[in-house]
Amino acid sequence: MRFLIIIPAHNEEGNLSFTLDSLQQQSFKDFQTVVVNDGSTDGTAEIIRKYTENDSRFETVNLQKSAHQPGSKVVSAFKNGLKTQNTDEFDIICKFDADIILPGNYLETVEDAFKNNPEYGLVGGLLYVEKDGGWVYEGNSNKHHVRGPMKAYRKESFVQIGGLRETLGWDNIDSILLENLGWKEVVIPELQVKLIKVKGADYTIRPADYYGRYFYFLGLNRFLAYIASSKEAAKSRSVSFFFKIIKAYEACKTAKLELKISKEEQKAINDKRWAMLKKKWLKI
């Protein structure tokens, strides 16, 4: 099986070489990498050039600077890289971040998982962050969800869900749509991926606005959005945080901002959320 790896990169001169080095050191060699230089103003272009000039498996796309918004920007860059390739030549499509370090057997293990399990649609490892001189599990999501920085899709499943959506929540929308179509999302825990940069550190959007917009663009109905908002507020132990999230969510609804999912997909997402909620209630 052959990999197509798309890496959006915006001002990643301090991180990108670690990611690309870890790709060059993979035990599995049959891959093509497109690094999308998304309007970088630092030395990112020079870092990319060192690889494209010396390794035919690396190429680049240069984009103009765009607003740094969570979700839509990174997917837009990914799509610009994807459209430069003939996807008929590949079996696995990856969206990787420019600030991760992959273990040397990452691609080989992912390829084996896809090859031996035809029902697998999305495969990945677990994210680890540096703390007190060591690497610890990030813990920002459940251990059965493949996080955005290290997505590997079977091409057939990727095509069936219509690719990635330029919106907040894209990396949850994909897994729900895959499951709805009968594909499995699988995390391989022994694949420990090091995350160099803390996610969200370069976003300017306030946390309450982020969650409100996230729940809206995920397509959640009002009741489920309020439940999700209460959970986030409980984590912060702040009643006011709940109302701020709701305010952002309702502002999106009032403005009737465009969703990047169809009515049928929105229903599938809400049905999945309902099922998860009922399962938790039954355990109480």
Image (cartoon, rainbow, N blue to C red):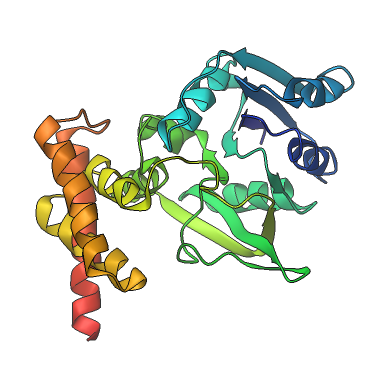
Q: Residue at 46% across / 62% down in the picture?
A: 141
Asked if residue 252 lies left or right of residue 159, the reply is left
Q: Which one is in front, 201 or 167?
A: 201
Above or below: residue 167 compared with residue 268: above
Camera-nearest residue between 208 and 64: 208
Question: What x and y, as percent, mark residue 193?
Answer: 68, 56
Q: Position of residue 92 (x, y in %)?
A: 58, 36
Q: Residue 76, percent across and down?
A: 46, 24
Q: In the displayed orientation, state which residue is furthest to the right.
A: 54
Quadrant of residue 59 within the rendered picture: top right
Instruction: Inspect this view and state whether residue 207 appears.
Output: yes
In the rendered view, tell whether residue 237 sits above or below residue 265. Answer: below
* Number of on-image labels: 0
| Quarter of the image with the C terminus in it | bottom left
**Which residue: 47% across, 63% down?**
144
| Residue 268 visible in rendering | no
